[in-house]
Image (tube, rainbow, N blue to C red):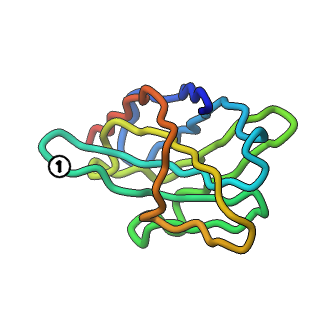
């Protein structure tokens, strides 16, 4: 298992930006998937973006062009740059990780096994 620690959440006005960080030593998995998820009160958790150790990424349609997932392997840190935030982006954001088999693709429904404690994002209109 990998311990994941998120940071970077906060309160912004609509149109603002935040960068979330997630620290964790996923290199122990070799090949892996990492993802960002969010959950608003009264709603189901939803996948926001994912990235594989080979750099392949995916973003949910509603955040494409505004959010970017990236990783800094030297710092063992996953990022989510969020621009032009809207009230519907608010919620608790979680990062997650899981090992993957070589050749297996990361997806929004991948079975993640490691989860952080979450960081709160609030967007006011």
Identity of the residue drawn at 62% across and 55% down: 33
Q: Is residue 21 above or below residue 37?
A: above
| Residue 123: percent from left, percent from top | 32, 39
Residue 106 is left or right of residue 9, and the answer is right
| Residue 46: percent from left, percent from top | 33, 55
Helix, strand or loop at mark 1: loop
Q: Circle 1 is placed at which residue position?
A: 43
| Residue 82: percent from left, percent from top | 53, 49
| Residue 93: percent from left, percent from top | 41, 39
Q: Quadrant of the N terminus?
A: top right
Q: Quadrant of the C terminus?
A: top left
Identity of the residue drawn at 68% across and 64% down: 101
Residue 94 is left or right of residue 71, and the answer is left
Tell me where residue 6 sits by quadrant. Answer: top right
Q: Is residue 100 above or below residue 45?
A: below
Label 1 Cα neighbours within 10 Å, binned few <14 / some 14-19 / many ≥20? few
Identity of the residue drawn at 58% across and 38% down: 19
Identity of the residue drawn at 61% across and 34% down: 21
């Amino acid at each position: 298992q990998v311990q994941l620690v998120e940071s970077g959440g906060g309160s912004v006005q609509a149109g603002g930006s935040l960068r979330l960080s997630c620290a964790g030593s996923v290199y122990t998995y070799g090949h892996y998937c990492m993802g960002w998820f969010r959950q608003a009160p009264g709603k189901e958790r939803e996948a926001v973006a994912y990235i594989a150790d080979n750099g392949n990424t995916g973003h949910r349609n509603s955040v494409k062009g505004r959010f970017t997932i990236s990783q800094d392997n030297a710092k063992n840190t996953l990022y989510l740059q969020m621009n032009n935030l809207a009230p519907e982006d608010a919620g608790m954001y979680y990062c997650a990780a899981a090992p993957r088999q070589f050749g297996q693709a990361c997806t929004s429904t991948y079975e993640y096994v490691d989860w952080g404690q979450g960081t709160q994002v609030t967007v006011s209109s």
